Amino acid sequence: MKNNDSPRSETVRVTETLRDEIIDGERAPGSRLVERNLASELGVSRVPVREALKQLASEGLVTHRPNTWATVREFSPSDVADLGEVRQAFDLLAFELAAQRHTREGLAALEATLEAGRRQAEAGDAVGAHRSAADFHAQVTELSGNRLLVEVGELLDSRMRWQLSQHDELDVVATEHAELFDAIAHRDVDRVRELAAHHLGTSRQQHEKHRERLAYETRADDDKAAGDDTAEDIRADETAAGVRADDTADDVGADGTAAGDDRSAQPPII
């Protein structure tokens, strides 16, 4: 079948696919992104893969290593702290301006995103809830009416989506977004400022809890693997001991049989 996709559309498709897989956690931090393998996996040539990796590197999701493969970025504590400082200024401004400048149409779209996120959180759809939470923040930035702020938000979008994907307590995020929406709808700037600051604190707490959970699961997996190896070694030792015991018994039996044969072969004493 002829592939009618243009190189540009293939690059966009590959970029979107890899971006979603990284943000959704399907590709783990530090995992290799080998052009040849990705091209085969996604059914494209290496050119759109190479361009996609360049784009994702500019978004802060991929790390290029000279003369070797790229990897999914591993965000250090310093990286997370830097992002938090930027969000402290960016989010507060975006929420305040949205409260002042939102339109009826924009508010309706924001409410639809809010309700979608709430349903996904109630259903336990983590990926869907995380995406809706990120869309909520992006739409708030649009409601600010500040085009430069929107452009800056686009530069930060992938990093912010990645951080929001680290939130495990979906109901907490949904509740806080509902409170923020209500304050925006009532143009209550003071309330919005207070809620946005609290929301940023919740985001930091959620990220830390997520990090601790992953560390605990990693230790548990390592302990289980070590326990499995120990049990396997014990079984191997027991099997070897059993074989040695059987060999010993066979040797003893063979010696006894041989001795009996020797005694029966001797002439009787008269």
Image (cartoon, rainbow, N blue to C red):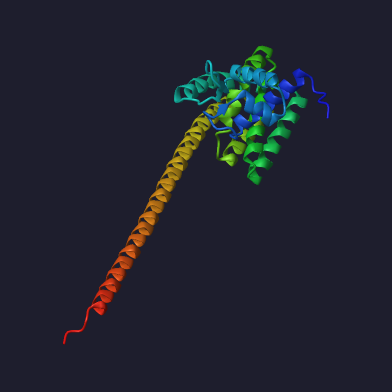
Q: Residue at x 47, y 42 (%)?
A: 217
The reply to whether residue 19 is visible in this rendering is no
Instruction: Judge by depth and name the residue closer to the eye, 110 or 263.
Output: 263
Q: Residue furthest bottom?
A: 270
Percent across and percent down for residue 31 are 54, 30
Q: Is residue 232 above or below residue 258?
A: above
Q: Residue at x 44, y 41 (%)?
A: 216
Q: Is residue 229 above or below residue 45?
A: below
Percent across and percent down for residue 242 are 36, 62
In the image, taking residue 10 as reference, residue 179 lies left or right, namely left
Percent across and percent down for residue 238 are 36, 58
In the image, taking residue 105 as reference, residue 230 lies left or right, namely left
The reply to whether residue 164 is visible in this rendering is yes
Name the quadrant containing residue 152: top right
Q: Count the marks: how many? A: 0
Q: Residue at x 53, y 31 (%)?
A: 203
Name the quadrant containing residue 189: top right
In the image, taking residue 41 as reference, residue 6 lies left or right, namely right
Percent across and percent down for residue 141 are 66, 21
Instruction: Judge by depth and name the residue closer to the eye, 205 or 124.
Output: 124
The image quadrant where one finds the N terminus is top right
The image quadrant where one finds the C terminus is bottom left
Q: Residue furthest left?
A: 270
Instruction: Judge by depth and name the residue closer to the eye, 215 or 226.
Output: 226
In the image, taking residue 231 as reference, residue 160 lies left or right, namely right
Q: Residue at x 52, y 33 (%)?
A: 202
Instruction: Judge by depth and name the residue closer to the eye, 33 or 115.
Output: 33
Name the quadrant containing residue 91: top right
Q: Is residue 247 above or below residue 55?
A: below
